[in-house]
Image: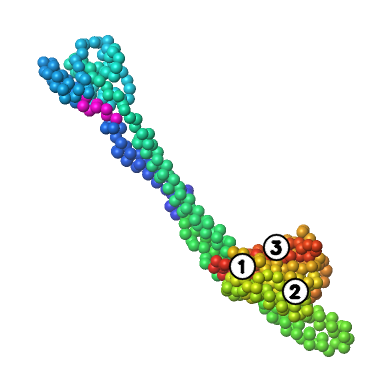
Amino acid sequence: MKLIGFLNLKGISGQIAALVVASTVAIHLILTAIFLIHRPDQTDPSTDRGHSQLTTMVQLLGAAPAAERPRLFADIARAFPQLDIESLAASPAAAANEPDGPELHGLRRRLGSGYRIFALAETGPRMGIALPDGAMISAKIRPDQRQRPIWRGPWIITLLFAVVSVTLLGVWAARALTAPLSSFARAAESFSVNGAEAPLPERGPEEIRSVARALNRMRERISALIDDRTKMLAAISHDLRTPITRMRLRSEFIEDDLHRSRMLGDLDQMRSMLESVLSFLRNDRKLESMTLVDVAITLQLIADQFADMDHKVGYDGPAHAMATVRPDDLHRSITNLVENAVRYGASATIRLAVSSDTVTIDVEDDGPGISDERKDVMLEPFVRGDDARNMDEVSGFGLGLSIARTIVLAHGGELSLNDRQPHGLIVRIRLPVHQHSRQSAA
């Protein structure tokens, strides 16, 4: 069973095995083709150096009778003077000394076993040849005027083809096996619980398809879990509104003004808490689509709204700045930040800076600020800036920063907390000017 699974081409192991076999077969086919094109048993004409003419003349002399050879020597001298073929007296000592060298291998192969090549005692580029009947002749060896380029050798071409083939097969295998994994990473980065993103494609080897199916099922379960949680809390919030309203009506009949005011305050706090928690839980749902908006006008509007409520909130930035955002979500996040700023400080400033691809929004206050060790903690839900045990509308419920950060992240931006000199806090938001098909909610 393990062998059958290993040879299954739908799995990664089977595809790797098939790749190795295909590479081996391809290399053998290349070697065979190179062998047939560059036959090692044939001499390259570029390195022949006149050996074909010499072979023909020597074989003609060897086949001719001894009486006809003088006439043939004269005819060869007139027709092929460059060979300089002459008759030699028998010399057993010379005939026993056979020279060696790559230039003579092809000549020996052409002449056959009936002929022998031997060295001569005299100097110069000459050699002796013994004919089949024992007669000996001498001829001139033409020097090699050029070297064969190394890149024209069959083994270099074979090696080049093998490297190219293995490289192409390796690139193909890497692409085929890793492309699904890259799509998994992109899907994980763009995952949203509202189901707007398309499911992962179930392609590639069997193991990859199994992982894709499992991740798609996990996304469905997460989305269903979030839906159930939001629906449950929405139902709780709706059901609690009725008894809270009844208790508020009954509290109006309390004669003691102090007790009546405290009871009404507690009921208002409960109602505000329910609405804040429900708003936070619904914050990861789809609310609106991206729209090209004048961010500067939005920030000026927020500053004017707080100024109308007798808060010292100003705007510092360009008169107009266009960016692709969710208008209501951006308005809500900046409003939460300004509410925190005026709650803990006497004044606040909204600053806007725009570059070619980034919008930077700073919300500054002159409050006590946040210590470095608490900056990361303050971005978590239900974490408040003070250490009071009781919750009220002054201290808040610890959701403003968390909601703003969630909205910013849904825009593909980032939110950070920075110190303001001499004291205070700067909440900095960086958003991309152009969005690329982001459909997940804030």
Which residue is depicted at the point 71% across and 78% down? 304
Q: Position of residue 294 (x, y in %)?
A: 61, 74
The one of 77 and 58 positioned closer to us in this rendering = 77
Judged by its main secondary structure, the magenta piece is helix
Question: Where does label 2 land, which residue?
Answer: 313
Local crowd at mark 3 within 10 Å, few (<14), some, or many (≥20)?
Answer: some
Judge whether residue 96 can be spotted in this image: no
Q: Position of residue 323 (x, y in %)?
A: 60, 70
Label 2 amino acid?
Val
Which residue is depicted at the point 50% across and 57% down? 180
The picture quadrant where one finds residue 295 is: bottom right
Say if the magenta span includes residue 421: no
Left or right of 279? Residue 154 is: left
C-alpha gap between disc 2 and disc 3: 20 Å
Question: Where does label 1 land, which residue?
Answer: 411
Q: Is residue 253 above or below residue 95?
A: below
Which residues fall within the magenta stretch? 47-54
Decide: marks 3, 1 in contact (CB < 8 A)?
no
Q: Earlier in the sequence, mark 2 or mark 3?
A: 2
Local crowd at mark 1 within 10 Å, few (<14), some, or many (≥20)?
Answer: many
Residue furthest out toward the left: 67
Question: Where does label 3 land, which residue?
Answer: 416
The one of 241 and 322 positioned closer to us in this rendering = 322
